[in-house]
Amino acid sequence: MERSHPAGAGASLSQEHLAELKQAKHLLEHPGYVARITDVIGMPLEAAVKALPASWSGKIASVTNASLTKCLKVANATLRPTGTSSFPKLHSAAVALSGAAGGAFGIAGLAVELPVSTVVMLRSIADIGRAHGEDLASGEAQLACLMVFSLGGKTADDDATDAGYYAARVALAQAMADATAYLAKHGMASEAAPALVRLIAQIATRFNVHVSQKAAAMMVPIIGAAGGALVNTLFINHFQDMARGHFTVRRLERLYGPEAVNAVYRQLQD
């Protein structure tokens, strides 16, 4: 797709675009997901995560990785640049249905439910990306959709002073470039290709934070089917917000250049 910067790489953003960037920064840097789930389950989410059985940690990581690998195959096979609308409520409803019974079956339920809900979320993320001008036929845009799953959550290795949106992009930059180059040359010849495996692993590390939180919330004994549906709705709403922020930034970068948008983003008070 066209990557020229008609406004000039160093141009100042228009007032309209400045307002859009400010809203994007607010979405990306101040997600309300944890607070909302805490309200639903009636206890601090951190405490719920700590209450998960120790044996679940590796199992959740495995389910997370498998779900993202499935998403990558779905993205490469089905995402196409048709239409300009997004339908977040429709996708939220579908994910809510999958979450209604998800907490009843423990880790086994998560292993069945998460790949389904993650693919639905990818479709919603892709719709939002397309509405912001992304060319979903390109491997680069498909991987930009997948990257959304890494946003809005901190890992144990994050430096508290540099754990925001652009830090996440920098951390993934080389893996994204290698995976994009592989897809451009080979397509989805093998999801086991080292470049794709590395990217999935890096995204999964951050996505796993959210999945563990979701699993913990849905394991709270009082949550019930209605609560499980609500937790899943909050889960997809978080990633829809991340997608709106991410693709707003990318759209503005196509207009003004990455350096100019990055500079303004860092100066914005949100």
Image (cartoon, rainbow, N blue to C red):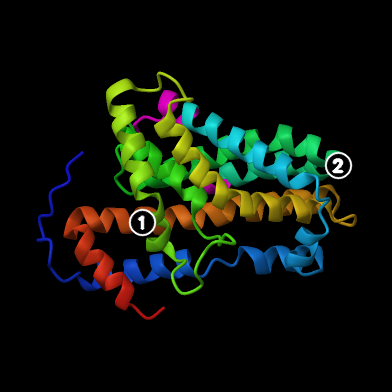
**259 shown above or below 264:** above
Indicate which disc residue 170 carries. 1
Q: Which residue is painted at 17% across and 46% down in the image?
A: 3
User: Within the image, what quadrant is residue 19 found in?
Assistant: bottom left
Q: Secondary structure at mark 1?
A: helix
Query: Magenta includes 76?
Result: yes
- Find out whether residue 223 is within the magenta segment: no
The stretch of residues the image draws in magenta is 74-89
Q: Residue at x 39, y 39 (%)?
A: 143
Residue drawn at (40%, 68%) of the image: 25
- Decide: few, some or many residues near mark 2? Use Cα within 10 Å; few <14, some 14-19, many ≥20: some
Q: Which residue is nearer to you in this view: 166 or 84? A: 166
Q: Is residue 83 visible?
A: no
- On the image, the x and y values in percent for residue 263 come to 25, 70
Look at discs 1 and 2 and give the one toward the viewer: 1
Left or right of 222, for residue 158 = left
Quick one: label 1, few (<14), some, or many (20+) residues within 10 Å? few
Residue 113 occupies quadrant = top right
User: To which residue does mark 2 refer?
Assistant: 104
Of the 4 image quadrants, the one containing the N terminus is top left
